[in-house]
Amino acid sequence: MSSENLVTLDVKDGIGIITVNNPPVNALSPGVPEGITACFEKAHADPAVKAMVLIGAGRSFIAGADIRQFGKGRVRQAIGDSTTDKLDASTKPIVAAIHGYALGGGLETAMGCNYRIAVRSAKVGLPEVLIGILPGGGGTQRLPRLAGVQVALDMITSGRHVPADEAKALGILDEVVDGDLLTAAIAMAKRIADIRPLPHISSNNARVIGIDPKIFDAQRKSIARRARNQKAPYNCILAVEASTTHPFLQGLARERELFVELENADEARGLRYAFFGEREAKNVPGIPANAPVQAINAAAVIGAGTMGGGIAMSFADFGIPVKILEATQEALDRGMKRIRDNYATSVKRGSLAEGEMTARLSRITPVLDYADIADADVVIEAIFEEMAPKQAVFRQLDAVMKPGALMLSNTSALNIDEIASVTKRPEVVAGAHFFSPANVMKLLEVVKGTETSAATMNSVMAMGRAIGKISVGCGNCDGFLANRSRGPFGMEMVILLEEGALPEQIDKVMVEFGYPMGPVAVGDLAGLDIGWAARKRRAAADPNYRKQPISDRLCELGRFGQKTGKGWYRYEAGDRTPHPDPEVTAIIEQVSTEMGITRRVISDEEILRRLLFASVNEACKILEEGIAYRASDVDVMWLYGFGFPRYRGGLMFWADQIGVKDVFEQIQRWHQLYGARWAPSALLRRLAETGTSFKDAKVG
């Protein structure tokens, strides 16, 4: 599409209206900046135009740059010669009229204008740090001059989206309106048409003069934990600091230097990959995008335990009324108390207003009778992980739920086809695997059974997005995609403990790699009894199942993790800090001796690679079987389900950076050393032989 079609100019009663029309979100794709410049210059040269309005057509102002263009060796304009700089140099007033989003390059463009007006629902921000770069269109130089250095530091290093009312309070917006945006923007343009001198952010140096440099060191300290191993947040701080030590044009030059350092770095490449992988995950291969979608206006959850309560909160948090059903009043009361306590904790922390807590609780209705949930559009079973009780629930649901209602199981591993087999409508049965805690974790693994319809898959994927989750589809097998690919990681972890590692070393390695918590501590958080039950089930089904005697010994002693105050670590009352426990060390050493293993010193590098390569190999098997649809789906699940560091792109992207051939050869060596559990998958062997990346693997 030509720039003439992407951006248009209309003149109405002396006001030049420049409209960006690049669906769906008016990204600054090639042609859009050029179109804005052309329309601006035409309006600027027209003596009939007294002032201008820059506005976006459709659902947004300008939602940011076109991320697809990053890392492609773009031709860069001379410093001070960008579209934003030209707007900033205008001798005629320009009003940016913002609805939807003004993010990244969108907010930078708006800051090139003299005034900014927005509807109340609009949001602004500079989120470039979230894809491993910094605002490279003058944002690090203009925002401090507009809203102050501390505001700029906080917004740019967090990447958060700021609501319009807050943005006005911060000085980013001049007006917030409730009526028609274009009408209000034109009225504003007429009011300021004759104002001189015009406000130009680039020359507003009062906000950046005399700043104590200690503010920047304080910011570095404040982000140290969440920015671990990343460069972009620190370059953001350096760029903002340049606004206080350099004249404007020199600050732009410094911003560009810092941007170029980041654009093609592994961190930015990994974050861009994760961004596009998340978008791709919305599409389930073989499921037509136009398949019908069931509207979810009322939900129900079976089971008021930790998972059931968290799922109910997930619906209530997004305005959807939900009923939660239990077998006894006692269990229901206990579950509702847990929900109230969770909300109360959020209020105490200041992350939730008390009025909003009341509103959310009002959307959750406890019930004891299946007949009370019959009109729900979706019901999610969230009872304990055993097939017979789950089938009993689905028989009941089949008898009472209205036609067309989605009937979903929150199982993390059990066969969806077996669950569906007890109903007369298997086409509406699917897996909806939430991750714990369900009201916090963003991943929803949507599992397609043999008879699950396209409409059901589309509906469950859409349902997840409607309640703030990242929905990723997969096929049906023991453990599905997420837990099955994670299983070898957990197995290798306990084998490393048998051979010589200790819990605190494994956790240290993975936290230094970028995980927010170590996997051993996560096990304590989730509850060790859950894995114990799954191991007993699998051992009963498979006489060759490799047991985990250390884990089993802990569970036999009642050490289930944080819930019992003891697991792999010990915990003080009211404190979730994991403390290494000499009793656990003694148990580990005793079991190793009983197994005839001579313990040895294991390097951090061996721990990292054995844990992750084991899962890479298993993920290849899952892809080969068509259970996973894309390598990027594996990555999205690991990012959102297991805390894999986002700036590393995901499990398979990380392995691609090492090289498929190197991964294969290391797994071959471990196969020779350790036996069958390290047998390379056929897909991994084929990729290594053909030099194909995991990202480009043809699967299924």
Image (cartoon, rainbow, N blue to C red):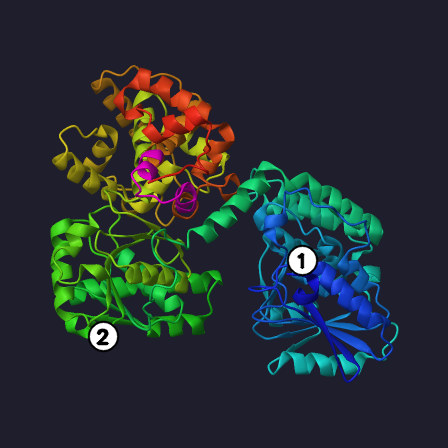
- For badge 1, the amino acid type reads Gly
Q: Between 266 and 26, which is closer to the camera in this rendering? A: 26
Who comes first in sequence, dot 1 or dot 2? 1
Which amino acid lies under the numbered mark 2 shown in the image of this protein?
Answer: Asp
Please state which of residues 420 and 167 is positioned toward the viewer in this rendering: 420
Instruction: Give the quadrant of residue 265.
Output: top right
What SS does tag 1 mark? helix
Work out how far the residue at label 1 is from the one at label 2, CA to CA, in angstroms: 46 Å
Residue at coordinates 24% horizontally, 41% vertically from top-left? Answer: 531
Q: Which mark is residue 105?
A: 1
Depth order, front residue of 77/298: 77
657 relative to 54, above or below: above
Is the residue marked by circle 1 packed among few (<14), some (14-19), or many (20+) residues within 10 Å?
Answer: many
Which residues, given as a range, are shown in magenta? 620-637
Q: Please tell me which residue is depicted at 19% across the width and 74% down the height of the picture.
A: 372
Q: Can see residue 246?
A: no
Give neighbour class at mark 2: few <14, some 14-19, many 20+ (Cα, 10 Å).
some
Q: Which residue is mark 2?
A: 375
**Residue 495 appears at what percent x and percent y?**
30, 26
The answer to if 601 sits in the magenta stretch is no
x then y, percent, for residue 380:
25, 61
Determine the main secondary structure of the stretch shown in magenta.
helix
Q: What x and y, as percent, mark residue 663?
A: 43, 25
Quarter of the picture holding the N terminus: bottom right
Residue at 74% from the left image edge and 80% from the top image edge: 188
Image quarter of the C terminus: top left
Residue 555 visible in this rendered orientation of the protein: yes
The quarter holding residue 525 reads top left
